[in-house]
Image (cartoon, rainbow, N blue to C red):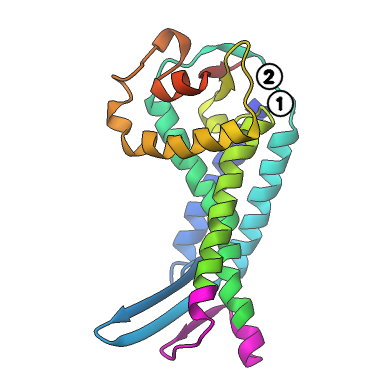
Amino acid sequence: MTVRRFRWVFLDLLGLIFGLTGYFSERPAFAASIEWTNGSYAFSGGTQPWSLGLSAVIVVAFILLMRAKRVESAGPLPGLLIRFAAFWIDFLLALFAFAPLYGAVPVIVEWRRTGAFAWFVERNIRVASDVPVVLLSMALLMVGLLFHFTIPFVLRRPSPGACVAGYQVVADEGYSLSLERVLLRNFVGYFALCTAWIAPFAGRDKQAGKFWLDKLFHTRAVLLD
């Protein structure tokens, strides 16, 4: 099964995300937060069984995509809007792949502390472990997001979002993307996202499928054949 065929898998998963979040809207799919409002304290955190199951399915689909047969390029991708849309598809899929684990941390810690298990925790009493739990949860989520955006470059496969959009970012001829270079590109890519409005004007080369970020790291966007 080639990478291009996986677009239908991830489109189905996107539909499942919207459907399940709408159906189970009475509780957040995942959370880990602390709030102080007018001197009152509130801690909340947790996950849901359906979000953990969806997380497992997304992760399995991601692994299969990374092991799928590569396809040849059908030429450069001239448009930038499709790359912007692909990023948000990736972000949503990565969020639902890793955030349920982020929400599981307070569930496990609270279970060990009280001996009572609950999928979602809400209380107004401050506990010494609250801040470390939230920080650990956020760190795990950040690592998961970084993993999602890094591994496709390393394995020379499209990300799930790029797969849905029908393209892939590859290194220019004569260049390679080491892990360190991919991490740096992802970091700079955050600023590219924040300044997306200048992308059509800065270092734009439609014929080569590039904008300034690609020129800086010797990459280009190509269509999947």
Number of marks drawn: 2
> Along the polypeptide, which appears first: circle 2 or circle 1?
1
The answer to whether residue 180 shows anywhere in this view is: yes
Question: Going 55% across and 24% down the picture, which residue do you hit?
Answer: 169
Side of 31 where 104 appears, left or right: right
> Is 35 one of the magenta-colored residues?
no
- Return the mark for residue 2: 1
Front residue of 54/121: it is: 121
- Return the mark for residue 71: 2
Side of 35 where 50 appears, left or right: right
Side of 16 where 209 appears, left or right: left
Q: In the displayed structure, would residue 20 be above or below residue 165?
A: below
Q: In the displayed structure, would residue 109 be above or below residue 80?
A: below
| Mark 1, secondary structure of its residue | loop
Query: Answer yes or no: do the residues labelled 2 and 1 have beta carbons within 8 Å?
Result: yes
- Tag 2: amino acid: Val
Question: Going 62% across and 31% down the picture, which residue do you hit?
Answer: 153
**How many residues crowd mark 2 within 10 Å: few (<14), some (14–19), many (20+)?**
some
